[in-house]
Image (cartoon, rainbow, N blue to C red):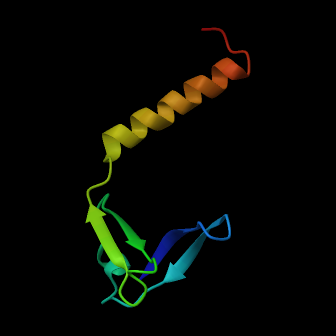
Amino acid sequence: VLRYVGVVDVVNNKGSVSLKRYPKEHPFAQLSGSDNIIAFTTIRYKNQPLIVRGPGAGAEVTAGGIFSDILRLASYLGAPS
């Protein structure tokens, strides 16, 4: 299963986003709809990362956020209000 995955490396102050392949059994491959998932790998959770999974914002909230960003960009570029 292909997923876009964001990685935050706090120790090295780096971040990245890439398309990664996961086996069907992996928690990242089992998402559906607008679900979100985060895996925390820390000193305590090094051998078995802590997984937090739950519903995302959903289509309506996401569309509203994008529309708000478009209006803000239009205003910044000088569009009449």
Residue at 35% x, 38% y is 61
Q: Nearer the viewer, residue 49 or 75?
A: 49
Picture quarter containing residue 38?
Answer: bottom left
The residue lying at 59 percent from left, 24 percent from top is 72
Image location (x, y in percent) of residue 27 = 32, 80
Given the current orientation, which residue lies at the most extreme top position? 81
Image quadrant assignment for residue 37? bottom left
Residue 48, percent across and down?
Answer: 35, 87
In the picture provided, is 59 more to the left or to the right than 13?
left
Q: Is residue 42 above or below residue 58?
A: below
Disc tally is: 0
The image shows residue 23, relative to residue 30, as above or below, that is: below
**Quadrant placement of the C terminus:** top right
**Relative to 16, residue 55 above or below:** above
Foreground of the two, 5 or 74: 5
Could you say where residue 53 lies in the image, as x and y percent from the top left? 28, 66
Rendered residue at 63%/67% (across/down): 16
Along the viewing direction, whichever of 43 and 38 lies nearer the viewer: 43
Find residue 71 and report its image quarter: top right
Residue at 40% over, 42% down: 62
Residue 52 lies, in percent from the top left, at 30, 67
Residue farthest to the front, as pictured: 44
In the displayed structure image, the side of residue 66 where residue 38 appears, left or right: left
Q: Is residue 54 left or right of residue 4?
A: left
- Side of 24 where 20 appears, left or right: right
In the picture, the quarter occupied by the N terminus is bottom left
